[in-house]
Image: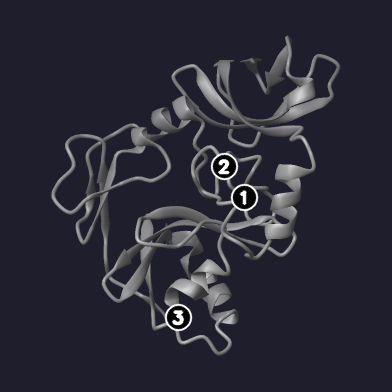
């Protein structure tokens, strides 16, 4: 379930621009708010609508996101308000007024002011394209967005300037090589989301997440991907 928030006021663009990972502008974007230590707090879509910016966020994170954004208002001429807008989405022909999901073409369209879903198997799409989901693969105060594929999915802009957590994120991009991250793996059997993935010698190699059609999203240590991996009773195939 989603909630749509509105950011109003003369400083709305500059306000969000200084906080989130992506460039806020005339086109819809997917972005995130991070901790100062560079860890994920919430991801959401931002889109302009007249004299306001709409924030499309998982309903379970909406109240906390409003609270955190309000902490940064200071003297900015902005107001952050809930709305009663709903959102519909699908992957068939897009209705008039719909926008393309900015993360990946396979995620189809979103229409604000309407409600519904065309029955698309969203987990299958996410697994096929390794697209993380809020509160599944994206875990507040734990996930680093580059390990979660934000650069590949157009969720971070390294040219936009400062934002909360920017220094850590830029250091991960430019000064280190990622040693772990989300990948799509094969799976024989099934196991609960969050099940540790183990090497034959019992050492932990990663964590299992969304599963669909014999494949799964997993957060893996790249140097521990190999034969003989298991997650509970399931067999993991890199």
State the residue position of label 2.
Answer: 151
Look at the numbered disc 3 and give the secondary structure of its residue: loop
The colour scheme of the drawn protein is one colour
CA–CA distance between discs 3 and 2? 27 Å
Q: Position of residue 165 (x, y in %)?
A: 69, 61
Residues at marks 1 and 2 touching, judged by CB atoms closer than 8 Å: no
In percent of the image, x 79 and y 40: which residue is there? 176
Residues at marks 3 and 2 touching, judged by CB atoms closer than 8 Å: no
Q: Position of residue 50 (x, y in %)?
A: 26, 72
Horizontal side, residue 203 vs residue 172: left or right: right
Q: Residues within 10 Å of mark 1 (few under 14, many from 20)?
A: some
**Along the viewing direction, whichever of 29 and 1 lies nearer the viewer:** 29
In percent of the image, x 43 and y 76: which residue is there? 12
Q: Position of residue 144 (x, y in %)?
A: 67, 48
**Along the viewing direction, whichever of 162 and 53 lies nearer the viewer:** 162
Q: Earlier in the sequence, mark 1 or mark 2?
A: 1
State the residue position of label 1.
Answer: 139
Q: Is residue 178 above or below residue 117?
A: above
Q: Earlier in the sequence, mark 3 or mark 1?
A: 3
Look at the numbered disc 1 and give the secondary structure of its residue: loop
Quadrant where the C terminus is found in the figure: top right
State the residue position of label 3.
Answer: 11
Single out the mark in the foreground, 1 or 2.
2
Q: Residues within 10 Å of mark 2 (few under 14, many from 20)?
A: some
Picture quadrant of residue 179: top right
Q: Position of residue 197 (x, y in %)?
A: 71, 26
Look at the numbered disc 2 and give the secondary structure of its residue: loop
In percent of the image, x 50 and y 62: which residue is there? 61
Q: Is residue 128 above or below residue 53?
A: above
Single out the mark in the foreground, 3 or 1.
3
């Amino acid at each position: 379930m989603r909630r749509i928030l509105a950011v109003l006021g003369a400083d709305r663009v500059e306000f969000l621009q200084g906080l989130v990972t992506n460039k806020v502008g005339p086109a819809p974007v997917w972005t995130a708010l991070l901790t100062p230590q560079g860890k994920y707090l919430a991801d959401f879509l931002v889109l302009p609508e007249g004299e306001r910016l709409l924030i499309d966020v998982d309903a379970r994170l909406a109240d906390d996101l409003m609270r955190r954004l309000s902490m940064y208002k200071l003297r900015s001429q902005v107001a952050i308000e809930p709305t009663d807008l709903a959102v519909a989405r699908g992957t068939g022909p897009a209705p008039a007024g719909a926008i393309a999901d900015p993360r990946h073409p396979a995620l189809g369209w979103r229409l604000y002011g309407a409600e519904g879903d065309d029955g698309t198997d969203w987990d299958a799409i996410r697994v096929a394209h390794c697209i993380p989901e809020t509160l599944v693969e994206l875990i507040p105060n734990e996930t680093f967005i580059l390990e979660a594929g934000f650069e590949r999915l157009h969720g971070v802009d390294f040219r936009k300037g400062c934002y909360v957590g920017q220094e850590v994120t830029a250091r991960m991009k430019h000064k280190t090589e990622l040693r772990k991250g989300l990948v799509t793996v094969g799976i024989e059997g099934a196991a609960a989301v969050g099940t540790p993935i183990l090497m034959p010698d019992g050492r932990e190699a990663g964590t299992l997440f969304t599963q669909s059609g014999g494949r799964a999203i997993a957060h893996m240590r790249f140097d521990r991907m190999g034969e003989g991996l298991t997650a509970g009773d399931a067999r993991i195939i890199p």
